[in-house]
Image: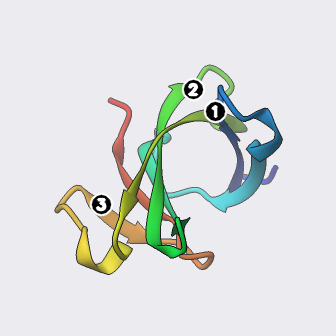
Amino acid sequence: MSEETWRAAFVHPQHPWRDFQRTLPVCGEVPPAAIRRPGSLAGMPAFDVYLLSDSSPWPAASTYTYTQSVLGDLRDHRPPEFSIDLEDDAVVSGSAE
């Protein structure tokens, strides 16, 4: 990774075939505390919520664990702490501090 990007690993503990990695732009001195990713649930708009689970390799990488899927569109569920929209429509929130 460069100084401008880092590698995020997304882990689904109960469904490892859904694990994936993404290179993301650096958005602060510490990794985001949560990342939301648009998707679907039973054919309806939804988003997956991932919480920071390991930041020890930061700033090169961090690991996020899937916690839940929420029905609705990201634009309809934007708490104030979710403030950065990434090009792939993921939303990054807060810091891990």
What residue sits 38% from the left and 33% below the top? 96
Characterize the local packing of mark 2: few (<14), some (14-19) or many (20 or more) Cα atoms within 10 angstroms. some
Residue at horizontal 54%, vertical 76%?
89
Q: How is the image coloured?
A: rainbow
Which secondary structure, mark 2? Answer: loop
Left or right position of 78 against 30: left
Q: Are marks 1 and 2 in contact (CB under 8 Å)?
A: yes
Q: Which mark is residue 82?
A: 3
- Residue 4 seen in the current view: no
Ranked by sequence position, the earlier of labels 3 and 2 is 2
Q: Is residue 1 left or right of residue 12?
A: right
Confirm or deny contact between disc 3 and disc 2 (CB under 8 A): no
Which badge, 1 or 3, is on the more N-terminal residue?
1
Measure the C-alpha gap from mark 1 to mark 2.
7 Å
- x, y (%) of residue 78? 24, 68
Q: Position of residue 46 (x, y in %)?
A: 44, 67
Q: 84 or 64, which lies in front?
A: 64
Relative placement, left or right, of 37 versus 5 is left
Residue 55, compared with residue 79, is above or below; it is above
Q: Give the Cα separation between the discs numbered 3 and 2.
A: 19 Å
The spot of residue 94 in percent (x, y) is: 32, 47
Residue drawn at (65%, 26%), measured in percent from left and top? Answer: 13
Give amino acid for label 3: Phe
Residue at the image point whose x is 46% and y is 63% from the top: 47
